[in-house]
C-alpha cells in the first residue's frame, strides 16, 4: 500500500508541474513562442543533417 500512495503522490506532483508549465507558457508572448519554435527547428535540423528532404527553419 505504501508504494501505491507514493506513486499517487508522484503522479499528482507531475500533473501539478505540468499544469504550472502550461500556465507559464500561456503567459509568454507570441513572439517568444515563435523564437523557441525556431530554436527547436534549428536543433532538429542539426540532429540529422543527412535527411534534408523538406526540412525548413523559419526566419524571424
Image (spheres, helix red, strand yellow):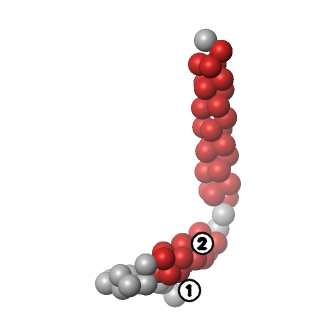
Residue 3 shows in the view: yes
Residue drawn at (64%, 72%) of the image: 32
Picture coordinates of residue 38, whole percent (x, y):
54, 78
Name the residue: 60% across, 72% down: 36
Q: Secondary structure at mark 2?
A: helix
Left or right: where 9 falls relative to 46: right
Along the line of sight, the residue nearer the viewer: 3 or 5: 3
Q: Nearer the viewer, residue 60 or 56?
A: 56
In which quadrant of the rendered image does the N terminus lie?
Answer: top right
Q: Position of residue 51 (x, y in %)?
A: 35, 82
- Binning the other alpha carbons within 10 Å of mark 2 as few (below 14), some (14 to 19) or many (20 upward) gives few
Vertical placement of residue 4 versus 22, above or below: above
Q: Which of 12 and 6 lies nearest the eye of the viewer?
A: 6
Disc 1: which residue: 60
Where is mark 2, residue-wise? 36
Left or right placement of residue 21 versus residue 51 in this view? right
Sequence order check: which comes first, mark 2 or mark 1? 2
For image coordinates 54% across by 76% down, the residue present is 43
In the shown orientation, is residue 39 left or right of residue 48?
right
Label 1: few (<14), some or many (≥20) within 10 Å?
few
Amino acid at each position: 500500500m505504501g508504494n501505491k500512495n507514493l506513486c499517487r503522490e508522484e503522479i499528482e506532483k507531475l500533473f501539478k508541474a505540468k499544469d504550472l508549465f502550461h500556465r507559464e507558457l500561456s503567459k509568454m508572448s507570441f513572439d517568444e513562442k515563435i523564437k523557441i519554435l525556431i530554436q527547436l527547428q534549428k536543433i532538429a535540423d542539426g540532429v540529422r543533417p543527412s535527411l534534408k528532404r523538406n526540412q525548413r527553419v523559419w526566419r524571424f
